[in-house]
Protein backbone atom coordinates (compact mmCIF):
# COMPACT_ATOMS: atom_id res chain seq x y z
CA UNK A 1 0.00 0.00 0.00
CA UNK A 2 2.82 2.38 0.83
CA UNK A 3 4.22 2.14 -2.70
CA UNK A 4 0.78 2.74 -4.20
CA UNK A 5 0.38 6.10 -2.49
CA UNK A 6 4.05 7.08 -2.19
CA UNK A 7 3.89 9.80 -4.83
CA UNK A 8 0.27 10.79 -4.29
CA UNK A 9 -0.25 14.33 -3.00
CA UNK A 10 -2.25 15.08 0.12
CA UNK A 11 -5.13 16.58 -1.93
CA UNK A 12 -5.09 13.41 -4.01
CA UNK A 13 -5.41 11.31 -0.88
CA UNK A 14 -8.32 13.42 0.34
CA UNK A 15 -10.03 12.97 -3.02
CA UNK A 16 -9.72 9.20 -2.71
CA UNK A 17 -10.90 9.27 0.90
CA UNK A 18 -13.95 11.22 -0.24
CA UNK A 19 -14.72 8.28 -2.55
CA UNK A 20 -14.49 5.87 0.38
CA UNK A 21 -10.98 4.51 -0.27
CA UNK A 22 -9.94 2.98 3.04
CA UNK A 23 -6.33 2.43 1.92
CA UNK A 24 -6.00 6.13 1.11
CA UNK A 25 -7.47 6.91 4.52
CA UNK A 26 -4.91 4.63 6.17
CA UNK A 27 -2.11 6.39 4.28
CA UNK A 28 -3.42 9.78 5.41
CA UNK A 29 -3.34 8.52 9.00
CA UNK A 30 0.21 7.26 8.52
CA UNK A 31 1.26 10.70 7.33
CA UNK A 32 -0.44 12.81 9.98
CA UNK A 33 -1.53 10.57 12.84
CA UNK A 34 1.54 11.31 14.99
CA UNK A 35 1.36 15.05 14.29
CA UNK A 36 -2.33 15.11 15.17
CA UNK A 37 -1.67 13.17 18.37
CA UNK A 38 1.11 15.58 19.33
CA UNK A 39 -1.24 18.54 18.90
CA UNK A 40 -4.04 16.80 20.79
CA UNK A 41 -1.74 15.89 23.67
CA UNK A 42 -0.39 19.45 23.92
CA UNK A 43 -3.95 20.65 24.45
CA UNK A 44 -5.41 17.86 26.60
CA UNK A 45 -2.26 16.86 28.52
CA UNK A 46 -3.76 13.39 28.78
CA UNK A 47 -2.82 10.28 26.79
CA UNK A 48 -6.31 8.77 26.67
CA UNK A 49 -8.00 12.05 25.85
CA UNK A 50 -5.45 12.75 23.11
CA UNK A 51 -6.10 9.34 21.58
CA UNK A 52 -9.84 10.00 21.73
CA UNK A 53 -9.34 13.34 20.00
CA UNK A 54 -7.31 11.82 17.17
CA UNK A 55 -9.91 9.10 16.65
CA UNK A 56 -12.72 11.66 16.49
CA UNK A 57 -10.71 13.97 14.22
CA UNK A 58 -9.93 11.28 11.66
CA UNK A 59 -13.50 10.03 11.80
CA UNK A 60 -14.60 13.55 10.91
CA UNK A 61 -12.09 13.61 8.05
CA UNK A 62 -13.48 10.33 6.77
CA UNK A 63 -17.05 11.63 6.89
CA UNK A 64 -16.35 15.12 5.57
CA UNK A 65 -13.58 14.53 3.03
CA UNK A 66 -15.96 15.43 0.21
CA UNK A 67 -16.35 18.91 1.75
CA UNK A 68 -12.63 19.66 1.71
CA UNK A 69 -11.77 22.75 -0.37
CA UNK A 70 -8.14 22.92 -1.42
CA UNK A 71 -8.53 26.59 -2.31
CA UNK A 72 -9.12 27.47 1.33
CA UNK A 73 -6.51 25.36 3.12
CA UNK A 74 -3.93 22.64 2.73
CA UNK A 75 -5.10 19.15 3.73
CA UNK A 76 -2.67 19.14 6.67
CA UNK A 77 -3.99 22.49 7.92
CA UNK A 78 -7.58 21.31 7.52
CA UNK A 79 -6.91 18.08 9.38
CA UNK A 80 -5.00 19.74 12.22
CA UNK A 81 -7.65 22.44 12.56
CA UNK A 82 -10.26 19.70 13.01
CA UNK A 83 -7.96 18.05 15.55
CA UNK A 84 -7.53 21.31 17.40
CA UNK A 85 -11.27 21.95 17.61
CA UNK A 86 -11.92 18.39 18.79
CA UNK A 87 -9.24 18.73 21.47
CA UNK A 88 -10.66 22.02 22.71
CA UNK A 89 -14.12 20.46 22.82
CA UNK A 90 -12.80 17.55 24.89
CA UNK A 91 -11.02 19.89 27.30
CA UNK A 92 -14.19 21.98 27.60
CA UNK A 93 -16.23 18.84 28.31
CA UNK A 94 -13.81 17.71 31.01
CA UNK A 95 -13.71 21.15 32.61
CA UNK A 96 -17.50 21.36 32.69
CA UNK A 97 -17.67 17.90 34.21
CA UNK A 98 -15.26 18.92 36.95
CA UNK A 99 -17.10 22.20 37.46
CA UNK A 100 -20.40 20.40 37.95
CA UNK A 101 -18.81 18.24 40.65
CA UNK A 102 -17.61 21.39 42.43
CA UNK A 103 -20.91 23.29 42.49
CA UNK A 104 -20.80 23.39 46.26
CA UNK A 105 -18.28 26.22 46.01
CA UNK A 106 -21.16 28.66 45.55
CA UNK A 107 -21.87 28.41 49.29
CA UNK A 108 -18.55 30.03 50.16
CA UNK A 109 -19.17 33.32 52.05
CA UNK A 110 -16.51 35.20 50.06
CA UNK A 111 -15.06 34.36 46.66
CA UNK A 112 -11.61 35.19 47.98
CA UNK A 113 -11.93 32.11 50.21
CA UNK A 114 -12.21 29.84 47.17
CA UNK A 115 -8.91 28.03 46.52
CA UNK A 116 -6.95 29.49 43.62
CA UNK A 117 -7.10 26.35 41.46
CA UNK A 118 -10.84 25.94 42.00
CA UNK A 119 -11.55 29.56 41.07
CA UNK A 120 -9.42 29.33 37.95
CA UNK A 121 -11.19 26.12 36.98
CA UNK A 122 -14.57 27.82 37.20
CA UNK A 123 -13.26 30.86 35.38
CA UNK A 124 -11.75 28.81 32.57
CA UNK A 125 -15.04 26.97 32.08
CA UNK A 126 -16.76 30.32 31.62
CA UNK A 127 -14.07 31.41 29.18
CA UNK A 128 -14.55 28.23 27.13
CA UNK A 129 -18.31 28.80 27.00
CA UNK A 130 -17.77 32.39 25.86
CA UNK A 131 -15.29 31.21 23.24
CA UNK A 132 -17.80 28.71 21.90
CA UNK A 133 -20.18 31.58 21.17
CA UNK A 134 -17.69 33.32 18.87
CA UNK A 135 -17.75 32.77 15.10
CA UNK A 136 -15.33 30.00 14.11
CA UNK A 137 -12.67 32.27 12.50
CA UNK A 138 -12.54 34.47 15.61
CA UNK A 139 -12.55 31.54 18.01
CA UNK A 140 -9.72 29.95 16.03
CA UNK A 141 -7.32 32.90 16.33
CA UNK A 142 -7.98 33.20 20.07
CA UNK A 143 -7.50 29.50 20.72
CA UNK A 144 -4.33 29.26 18.66
CA UNK A 145 -2.74 32.44 20.00
CA UNK A 146 -3.74 32.39 23.67
CA UNK A 147 -3.97 28.65 24.31
CA UNK A 148 -1.30 27.39 21.90
CA UNK A 149 1.10 30.34 21.96
CA UNK A 150 1.21 31.13 18.23
CA UNK A 151 2.28 34.66 17.35
CA UNK A 152 0.14 36.68 14.95
CA UNK A 153 2.79 36.30 12.25
CA UNK A 154 2.74 32.52 12.74
CA UNK A 155 -1.05 32.53 12.58
CA UNK A 156 -0.98 34.47 9.33
CA UNK A 157 1.28 31.83 7.79
CA UNK A 158 -0.59 28.90 9.33
CA UNK A 159 -4.04 30.10 8.28
CA UNK A 160 -2.97 31.59 4.95
CA UNK A 161 -4.32 35.04 5.83
CA UNK A 162 -2.73 38.52 5.65
CA UNK A 163 -1.23 39.68 8.93
CA UNK A 164 -3.61 42.66 8.97
CA UNK A 165 -6.59 40.31 8.76
CA UNK A 166 -5.29 38.26 11.69
CA UNK A 167 -4.75 41.39 13.80
CA UNK A 168 -8.22 42.72 12.98
CA UNK A 169 -9.85 39.35 13.62
CA UNK A 170 -8.03 39.02 16.96
CA UNK A 171 -9.06 42.51 18.06
CA UNK A 172 -12.70 41.89 17.19
CA UNK A 173 -12.64 38.49 18.89
CA UNK A 174 -11.13 39.89 22.08
CA UNK A 175 -13.65 42.72 22.19
CA UNK A 176 -16.56 40.29 21.89
CA UNK A 177 -15.00 37.83 24.31
CA UNK A 178 -14.42 40.46 27.00
CA UNK A 179 -17.99 41.71 26.66
CA UNK A 180 -19.34 38.18 27.10
CA UNK A 181 -17.10 37.53 30.08
CA UNK A 182 -18.21 40.73 31.76
CA UNK A 183 -21.81 39.58 31.33
CA UNK A 184 -20.80 36.35 33.08
CA UNK A 185 -19.23 38.29 35.96
CA UNK A 186 -15.59 37.70 35.02
CA UNK A 187 -13.75 41.01 35.12
CA UNK A 188 -10.42 42.29 36.39
CA UNK A 189 -12.16 42.87 39.73
CA UNK A 190 -12.47 39.12 40.31
CA UNK A 191 -9.77 37.36 42.34
CA UNK A 192 -7.03 35.67 40.31
CA UNK A 193 -8.34 37.19 37.07
CA UNK A 194 -5.35 39.45 36.41
CA UNK A 195 -3.36 36.64 34.79
CA UNK A 196 -5.98 35.79 32.20
CA UNK A 197 -6.71 39.45 31.45
CA UNK A 198 -3.14 40.22 30.32
CA UNK A 199 -3.15 39.95 26.53
Image (cartoon, rainbow, N blue to C red):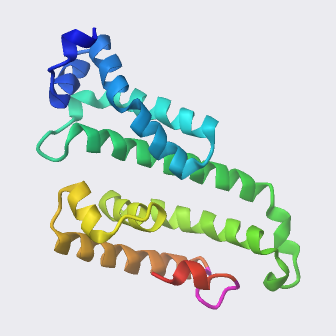
Give the answer, above or below, for where 18 lies relative to 74.
Answer: above
Inspect this view and state whether residue 83 appears. yes
Q: State the residue at coordinates (30%, 30%).
A: 64
Image spot of residue 152 (x, y percent): 29, 70
Q: Is the magenta stretch mostly helix, strand or loop?
A: loop
Horizontal side of 197 relative to 48 (left or right) equals left
Please state, as top left, top right, bottom left or bottom right, where the N terminus lies in the image. top left
Give the answer, above or below, for where 34 lies relative to 81.
Answer: above
Image spot of residue 171 (x, y percent): 32, 79
Please state, as top left, top right, bottom left or bottom right, where the C terminus lies in the image. bottom left
Give the answer, above or below, for where 68 lies relative to 22.
Answer: below
Give the answer, above or below, for where 130 lies relative to 24.
Answer: below
Image spot of residue 116 (x, y percent): 76, 75
Residue sitting farthest toward the left: 71
The part of the chain drawn in magenta is 185-191
Image spot of residue 136 (x, y percent): 34, 57
Residue sitting farthest toward the bottom: 189
Q: State the residue at coordinates (42%, 48%).
A: 84
Q: Quadrant of the rendered structure where residue 58 is?
A: top left
Q: Quadrant of the rendered structure where residue 157 is?
A: bottom left
Inspect this view and state whether residue 86 appears. no
Horizontal side of 145 relative to 78 (left or right) equals right
Amino acid sequence: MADTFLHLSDPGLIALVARGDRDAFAELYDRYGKTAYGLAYRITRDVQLAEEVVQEAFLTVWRQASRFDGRRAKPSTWLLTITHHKAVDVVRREQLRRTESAEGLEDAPDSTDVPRDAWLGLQHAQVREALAALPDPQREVIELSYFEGYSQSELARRLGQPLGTIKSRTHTALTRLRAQLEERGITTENPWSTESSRT
